[in-house]
Image: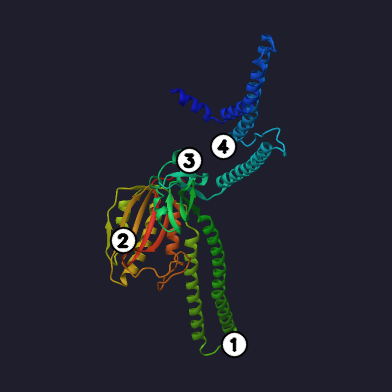
Amino acid sequence: MNPFRRISYWFASHENRVLYASLMAGSVAVIFSLVVLWSGDTFSAKVRWTMTVLIMGFWLGFAFSARERVVSPLRTLANLLEAMHEGDYSIRGRGARQDDALGEVMIQLNAIGTTLRAQRLGAVEATALLTKVMEEIEVALFTFDDQERLKLVNRAAERLLALPAARLLGRTATELGLDEFLHSEASETIARSFPGSAGRWGIRRTSFRESGLPHTLLVVADLTRALREEELQAWQRLVRVLGHELNNSLTPIKSIAGSLAQLLNRQPRADDWEDDMKDGLSVIASRSESLSRFIGAYSRLAKLPRPVLAPVELYRLIHRVANLETRAPVKVQNGPAITLQADADQLEQMLINLVRNAVDASKETGGGVSVTWEVEGPMATVLVLDEGLGLSNTANLFVPFFTTKPGGSGIGLVLSRQIAEAHGGTLTLANRAGVRGCQARLQLPLSQSF
């Protein structure tokens, strides 16, 4: 290395500049002392060399000591800052005093370390609490980065996708089958089958930033339990309605029966007593028949037997149901060969109800009815499509005894949905997108065990 560059490099460091300044500060006195010491014959050679060594020793000693007094506190400060940089806020500087400039700096650094330590402890505790809450809540949480790769998942999400976190993290939303939720509305309610569960779900999506990069938080909440509680309340209200209807039928029957008994006990009887008897008995028979139909429909709805599983070829089942409908032709668009483990009688009854409703809806417009099926992941999906006027109000479709058809019982769709859910599937009705008509969507698991 060039000697001048080496000297320049030596003077570039702070401690060497302090040493140089200390040497320069004492150099005048040292030179003057040496000149006085070595000029003339006042001192012997031994004294001169002894004093020279002492002067040079004290000069260099004090210069290096001054450098160390300046450099040592700076190194302490550097160590404190390095520890903070590494996240260690437990190290403190010692010997700091209020009446010293470097001591005040040390005191402030110690205070900063105490503050950062308290903040870090609070952040760690908050993170631990948040992690615990995320693990315990029953809502599935997914966090995706700007590349739509999964970065965070909780236990509910693992159960929903039926995979451990180790196999989920790093995979894209498309691979997980969640990409549609990242590009749809920020809040929606859907009926969907996931690998770990099926039912109705509330989807919520929000965005946030981490390290300056955009991330997406996806929340999937199971609404089935809440809806079941509401359904239980609906059933309780229904029982009250049934009691009201029973009373409405039994009260006039009891009254007419009492009147007829008085008519028979009256002596002498009126000339038209036979006509009165016939009219009263006719009213009793009519109300009894109506009440019998009402109770029969309720019994069918409330006593659905448990499905008896057996292999069912979906192709044969759908063609058999289509051939049973004689009022209008039903077009079957063949799908893949699928064999389900299901109760053939219950599935047939459910499909008959759906096809019959589709034919009734299409008769008003002269449209057609078609049935098709496909495979979607672990589920088989059956679609019953009509070309009717569509649905004007979907809120009461699955309310027991609610019907818009003259002479309808109002239990067909409710019974069909119970059959679908008893098989671990779902049944939804919605208007078709882009065309006139309604779509009944039935999803059944390809394999299951009860």
Q: Is residue 142 left or right of residue 326?
A: right
Tell me if 106 is positioned left or right of 159 in this view.
right
Closer to the N terminus: mark 4 or mark 3? 4
Instruction: Determine which residue is flagged by label 1.
Output: 267
Between marks 3 and 2, how big is the CA–CA gap?
Answer: 49 Å
Q: Is residue 102 above or below residue 210?
A: above
Query: Mark 1 falls on what kind of element?
Result: loop
Q: Amino acid at mark 1?
A: Gln
Q: Nearer the viewer, residue 419 or 137?
A: 137
Q: Earlier in the sequence, mark 1 or mark 2?
A: 1
| SS at circle 3 | helix
Q: Secondary structure at mark 2?
A: helix
Picture residue at 57% right of the left edge, 84% below the top: 263
Residue under numbered circle 4: 85
Give percent across and percent down for residue 341: 39, 47
Q: CA distance from mark 2 to mark 4?
A: 78 Å
Residue at horizontal 65 percent and vertical 29 percent from the top: 69
Sequence-wise, the earlier of marks 2 and 4 is: 4
Q: Can you give x and y, in whole percent of width and height, for residue 84 in the image? A: 59, 37
Give the image location of residue 346, x and y in percent.
Answer: 41, 55
Pointer 3 or 2: first along the chain: 3
Residue denoted by label 3: 165
Q: Name the residue type under label 3.
A: Ala
Image location (x, y in percent) of residue 322 = 30, 59
Most foreground residue, 212 or 18: 18
Q: Which residue is mark 2?
A: 324
Q: Are marks 1 and 4 in contact (CB under 8 Å)?
A: no
Query: 184 or 220, which is in the foreground?
Result: 184
Q: Between tags 2 and 4, which lies in front? A: 4
Quadrant of the rendering where the N terminus is positioned: top left
- Residue type at the position of mark 4: His
Which of 282 and 77 lies nearest the eye of the viewer?
77
